[in-house]
Image (cartoon, grey):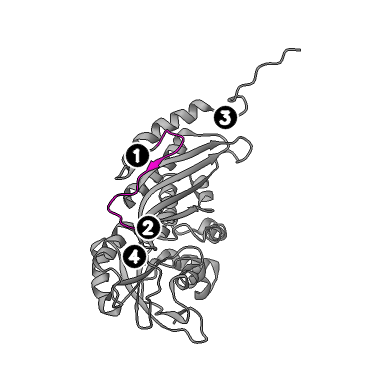
Amino acid sequence: MTQTPLSYKDAGVDIDAGDALVERIKPLAKRTMREGVLAGIGGFGALFEVPKRYKEPVLVSGTDGVGTKLKLAFEWNMHDTVGIDLVAMSVNDVLVQGAVPLFCLDSFACGKLDVDTAAAVVGGIARGCELSGCALIGGETAEMPGMYPSGEYDLAGFAVGAVEKSKILSGAGVKAGDIVLGLASSGVHSNGFSLVRKCIERGGADLPATLDGQPFRQAVMAPTRLYVKSVLAALAAHPATASGGGIKALAHITGGGLLENIPRVLPDGLAARLTKGSWPRTELFAWLQQTAGIDDHEMNRTFNNGIGMVVVVDPADAAAVAQTLRDGGESVHRIGAIAARGEGAAVVVE
């Protein structure tokens, strides 16, 4: 018995759609090119040469995804900003070591490739790279029938940066009396969305029309803020010095919130004492706390709660560092100071 031939397309994989996506991605990636790129989109491997200005370059890498924020992107058909989230989650992590992000790669996986949706997502990735000054030099688009429900996809990405060995920020120089500055977040960023989605479910038909001057869905889906350019400018203007001045540590406030991320850059025996109310309370976070019915402690270890990046700085330089960051477009708040830990927690908000 002769059987009808089966093609890859019959099995659910459309090579032509994949090729069409690559052609739409190329001009987006081209806009992100920077010094060091030798070969990017289209080859088996992307080539990057560490810029020659580095004397003792150390490569710093970070990888992340977007989490269950994607579920809202599917439900609300909002795909143009989650790519920015993907880039931001990795480049902000690389940044806290003092590194300049050099390049990013991404992975987009789906059950059936929708070229328009994929192009919107990758457009966001390219935009995130542009805003952080790094190159989108490669990636993977995987069409895997049967692995994902119709209309859904998954994202993963990573970034690589470089820093002079002598300028790595480790937090080792942090001491009691140092000032803690907080840089405002753009919203929830990309952590805590399992609870966000529960709050939306609980809110039902009574969801607010607007939050913080934006339509509800835009406020919830606002992409993760990219701190790269402003913080790099501050690091260049106020580097850590041998005498103990300048910027000493950075902490990206992601999963675990303020309570679990700040301790990652503190030496043993020290704690961050934060002043409650020293940064603005947004309508978004007020709504989340009220709807979830959780206390301040749970808010500060679930969400960034309004602070997306923390800067630890010598008190003599705190005002100048804050001004440099403001000049770079950041909303900066003096949220606390470093103190001896004693028997207490590593972060105290009081």
Q: Position of residue 7 (x, y in %)?
A: 61, 22
Residue 204 numbered mark, or none: none
- Label 1 and label 4: CA atoms lie apart by 27 Å
Q: Secondary structure at mark 1?
A: strand
For label 4, the residue is 166
Sequence-first disc among 3 and 4: 3
Residue 44 magenta: yes
Sequence-first disc among 1 and 3: 3
For label 2, the residue is 225
Q: Nearer the viewer, residue 231 or 70?
A: 231
The residue depicted at 40 percent of the width and 30 percent of the height is 23
Q: Quadrant of the N terminus?
A: top right
**Crowdedness near tag 4: few (<14), some (14–19) or many (≥20) residues, C-alpha within 10 Å:** few
Give amino acid for label 2: Arg
Quadrant of the rendered structure where residue 212 is? bottom left
For label 1, the residue is 38
**Crowdedness near tag 3: few (<14), some (14–19) or many (≥20) residues, C-alpha within 10 Å:** some
Q: Which residue lies most toward the bottom here?
A: 342
- Label 1 and label 2: CA atoms lie apart by 29 Å
- Label 3 and label 2: CA atoms lie apart by 35 Å
For label 3, the residue is 13
Quadrant of the rendered structure where residue 236 is? bottom left
- Label 1 and label 3: CA atoms lie apart by 31 Å
The residue depicted at 38 percent of the width and 47 percent of the height is 103
The magenta-colored residue range is 41-56
